[in-house]
Image (cartoon, helix red, strand yellow):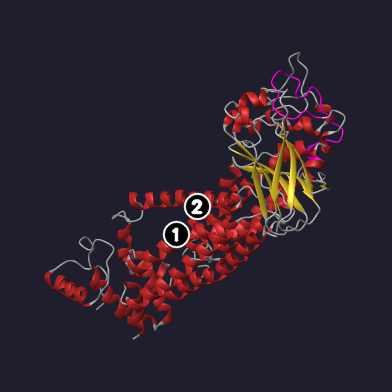
């Protein structure tokens, strides 16, 4: 079971840590305010950490109970065979591997070839492991012996359950991620939207317009700035996420 | 480090972002795939015909219903019992005969560990009984084959079926997994010193039949995952028509009374998805429906509140 942490899920996480970029280097230089996410402790707040832990627990609960309920006591194959401990375990394990790797795919902001390789090979390696380890003599592989090759691989129920459970485990996170980036974006989320918009428009000049608009929104110093900001706020229906009282208007284009 | 696209993290990449187009399409796609799969699964489950009969209470003679434990432990009382089953819908062969046990925790850790696979596999290791406590040796120190609690608690009810005057033979060949028969239970290991002690837990085994042919034992030793489980008893290769009456002659030997367990006899057909499993179909329909609902919800939100930071930036730059 410790193989799980080491082999099947470490690679995508390491790849994400090393290669992921939420905002490109060029934009980082343009928006030094991004740096404020550090001192303001926006990314390592307890609420965020607890949120991720809760998500882990929630996904585990979904995977566990859905797998059990889908494969109860009746037969799972055309030839009338029923499940046992090792079959249920292998199915649940498969769902977890899929859910975790797809979670990586949803979370990663910067999809290089390396990320692709890590994620898809993570899943592929799991099936390879099941086949190869299952082929080793039972004195070594004990309950894993032939569990995929004989019992699960040819059972349509196995694949049907895997699809259901993996997707069901990801829907909560996906929904919350959409709600967050649409309605409550962090500063770096806003920059990401900007990045995305910039790709579709004329670069520097339009960016200047956007930048000015953007910096006005985030400012909080000075009477006129406050008046302008108030005006803008009452006219638009934009929702702010970060505490604007601390942020200074450091990005200004004249 | 030397400049390269890799070290400067400028590898070609796509930067996916949750645009409304993407989000709605993903939810819609999932919904559109899941709903038909759910319908198909539900139809497959509805096709399965199942007859379940609980007999552990009904088979206790009326004068002993308040002392079932004494009944089951008394060897002089006949455990023969006759049950009548009615077939509700036509059942095409092969019809699978299972015994179902409720509240029996074959997945208890100490129980699962109480076996010795080396002994079952290898004739030369017949004397190894490590981890088989408390069923390792007989009272006079001889090693038990097969040792352990799992083998000791082998289910021992038997069933025979007749339809009117016709005998329905139960085919008990190949009820276990092939890999178990060929690799985990040896052809030259025979039961010895089995069920010899004071406490009888279940079936006695014929010591002239090698373990690889003791299919009931092999099926039983594949420990179940959940406290309610079925195990394959055999297959009937006869078609059953609707309203057929099946007479079951069973021997109610197994003691489930001391722990509040239930025993049920199950006859069932099977489809490509297996046995009767309504949950899978419903789960797919619910998840698919939820996704379609979310697709519509997000579309609505996008249409009603387009002036969000996310979309505002787009509308600004496009001007």
Q: Nearer the viewer, residue A251 or B258?
A: B258
Which quadrant does the N terminus of chain A fall into?
A: top right
Start-end of magenta stretch: B183-205
Judging by the rendered image, the residue that carries numbered circle 2 is A62
Vertical order, A240 against B168 (above or below): below
**CA–CA distance in space, label 1 to label 2:** 10 Å
For label 1, the crowd category at 10 Å Cα-Cα, with few meaning under 14, some 14 to 19 and many 20 or more, is few
Vertical order, B191 against B164 (above or below): above
Q: Quadrant of residue A177?
A: bottom left
What kind of secondary structure does the magenta stretch mostly adopt? loop
Vertical order, B143 against A46 (above or below): above
Could you tell me residue A57's position as x and y percent? 45, 48
Q: Residue at x 76, y 56 (%)?
A: B240
Judging by the rendered image, the residue that carries numbered circle 1 is A172
Disc 1, disc 2: CB below 8 Å?
A: yes
Q: Which residue of the protein is positioned furthest toward the top in this rendering? A: B140
Chain under disc 2 = A
Q: Is residue A135 magenta?
A: no
Vertical order, B187 against A178 (above or below): above
Chain under disc 1 = A
Q: Is residue B202 magenta?
A: yes
Q: Secondary structure at mark 2?
A: helix
Q: Secondary structure at mark 1?
A: helix
Could you tell me residue A219's position as x and y percent? 21, 68
| Left or right: residue A25 compared with residue B81 | left
| Left or right: residue B159 compared with residue A96 | right
């Amino acid at each position: 079971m410790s193989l799980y942490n080491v082999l099947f899920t470490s690679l995508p996480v390491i790849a994400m840590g090393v290669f992921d970029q939420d905002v490109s280097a060029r934009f980082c230089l343009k928006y030094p305010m991004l740096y404020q996410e550090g001192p303001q402790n926006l990314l390592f707040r307890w609420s965020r950490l607890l949120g991720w832990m809760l998500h882990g627990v929630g996904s585990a609960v979904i995977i566990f109970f859905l797998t059990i309920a889908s494969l109860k006591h009746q037969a799972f194959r055309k030839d009338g065979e029923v499940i046992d401990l090792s079959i249920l375990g292998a199915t649940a394990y498969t769902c977890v591997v899929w859910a975790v790797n797809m979670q990586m795919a949803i979370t990663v902001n910067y999809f290089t070839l390396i990320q692709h390789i890590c994620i898809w090979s993570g899943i592929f390696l799991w099936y390879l492991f099941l086949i190869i380890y299952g082929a080793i003599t039972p004195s070594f592989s004990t309950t894993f012996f032939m569990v995929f090759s004989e019992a699960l691989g040819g059972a349509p129920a196995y694949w049907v359950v895997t699809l259901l459970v993996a997707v069901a485990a990801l829907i909560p996170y996906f929904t919350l991620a959409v709600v967050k980036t649409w309605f409550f974006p962090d500063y770096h989320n806003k920059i990401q939207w900007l990045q995305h918009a910039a790709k579709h428009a004329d670069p520097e000049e339009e960016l200047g317009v956007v930048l000015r608009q953007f910096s006005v929104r985030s400012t909080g110093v000075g009477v006129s700035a406050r008046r302008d900001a108030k005006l803008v706020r009452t006219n638009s229906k934009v929702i702010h996420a970060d505490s604007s009282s601390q942020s200074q208007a450091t990005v200004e284009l004249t | 480090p030397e400049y390269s696209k890799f070290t400067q993290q400028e590898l070609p990449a796509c930067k996916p972002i949750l645009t409304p187009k993407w989000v709605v399409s993903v939810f819609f796609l999932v919904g559109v795939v899941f709903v038909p799969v759910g319908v198909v699964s539900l139809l497959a489950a509805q096709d399965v015909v199942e007859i379940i009969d609980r007999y552990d209470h009904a088979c206790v003679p009326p004068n002993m219903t308040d002392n079932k434990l004494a009944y089951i432990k008394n060897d002089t009382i006949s455990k023969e019992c006759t049950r009548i089953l009615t077939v509700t819908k036509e059942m095409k062969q092969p019809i699978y005969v299972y015994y179902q046990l409720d509240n029996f925790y074959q997945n208890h850790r100490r129980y699962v560990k109480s076996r010795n696979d080396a002994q079952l596999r290898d004739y030369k290791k017949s004397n190894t009984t490590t981890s088989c406590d408390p069923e390792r040796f007989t009272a006079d120190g001889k090693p038990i084959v097969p040792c352990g609690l799992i083998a000791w608690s082998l289910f021992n009810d038997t069933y025979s079926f007749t339809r009117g005057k016709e005998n329905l033979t139960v085919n008990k060949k190949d009820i276990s997994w092939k890999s178990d028969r060929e690799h985990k239970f040896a052809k030259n290991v025979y039961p010895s010193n089995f069920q010899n002690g004071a406490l009888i837990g279940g079936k006695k085994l014929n010591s002239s039949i090698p373990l690889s042919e003791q299919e009931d034992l092999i099926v039983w030793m594949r420990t179940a995952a959940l406290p309610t489980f079925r195990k394959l008893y055999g297959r009937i290769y006869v078609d059953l028509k609707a309203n057929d009456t099946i007479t079951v002659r069973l021997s109610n030997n197994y003691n489930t009374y001391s722990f509040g367990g239930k025993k049920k006899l199950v006859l069932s057909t099977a489809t490509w998805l297996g046995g009767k499993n309504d949950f899978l179909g419903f789960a797919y329909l619910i998840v698919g429906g939820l996704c379609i609902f979310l697709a519509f919800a997000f579309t609505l939100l996008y249409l009603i509140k387009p002036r969000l930071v996310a979309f505002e930036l787009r509308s600004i730059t496009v001007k």
